[in-house]
Image (cartoon, rainbow, N blue to C red):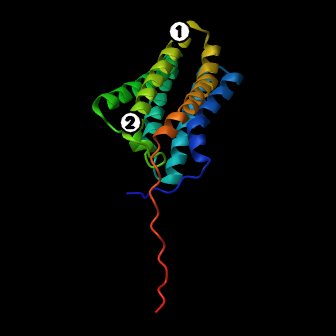
Amino acid sequence: MATPRPAPRWLRPTVDYGPLGVFFAAYCVYDILIATGAMLGATVVALSLSFILTRRVAVTTLVTSAMILVFGGLTLWLSDESYLKLQSTLINGGFSLLLFAAVAFGWPVLRALFGLAMPMSDDGWRILTLRFALFFAGMAAANEAIARLLPTALWVDWNVFGQTGVTLGFLALQWPLLNRHLLPAPAKAPRCVGRED
């Protein structure tokens, strides 16, 4: 089994946003089908790069990428952009259902993902999980409404810029919660001092 390696700082944003950037650039020059094909190629490259450099791929990245490949592939195969639009609804809806189930059954999903970086109380994790569940449900509903009611060009803008901006805003609004429920860092053991005889 391959041993995980530390990831370069540029890798995560490249894997998360690189395929989306490629999609938008191709859409501006060509059309949504060519842009979808370019995004699928960029997704495969991003996953390969992550595995080559770190010997692992984050579970959330793997799930999201699999959905993009399946629904992007259906879009190309059937020449129907509605499948591409649907994948964003399903990804957000799936995350929402998972997190609602985590709240209901006490599964520490977010703690498992971020616990080392953000040591919080049980109440903090429960509230944060519920907030994320509601957020993803809202994002799924918003994507579905925009995909069905507005032109494709506006859906592309929402998919590339709108979702990213709303997500960053939502994350910024969670800082007061994190500050209230963060646990104090464990005290460091005193350093050994040489004994003089």
Residue found at the far front of this picture: 197
Residue for point 47% across, 43% down: 182
Which label belongs to residue 148?
Answer: 1
Which label belongs to residue 183?
Answer: none
Give how far across and how far down residue 82 sits, in percent: 51, 14
Asked if residue 7 is positioned above or below residue 26 in the image, the reply reads below
Camera-side residue of 103 and 22 = 103
Few, some or many C-alpha atoms within 10 Å of disc 2 (few <14, some 14-19, many ≥20)?
few
Quarter of the figure with the N terminus: bottom left
Badge 1 marks a residue whose secondary structure is: helix
Few, some or many C-alpha atoms within 10 Å of disc 1 (few <14, some 14-19, many ≥20)?
few
What is the C-alpha distance between the residues marked 2 and 1? 38 Å
Give the mark toward the camera: 2 or 1: 2
Residue for point 50% across, 14% down: 144
Q: Quadrant of residue 134?
A: top left
Q: Amino acid at mark 1?
A: Arg
Camera-side residue of 187 and 29 = 187
Badge 2 marks a residue whose secondary structure is: helix
Give how far across and how far down residue 171 sits, in percent: 55, 32
Which label belongs to residue 123?
Answer: 2
Give how far across and how far down residue 176 sits, in percent: 54, 34
Q: Amino acid at mark 2?
A: Asp
Camera-side residue of 34 and 125 = 125
Residue found at the far right of this picture: 29
The reply to whether discs 2 and 1 touch (Cβ–Cβ < 8 Å) is no
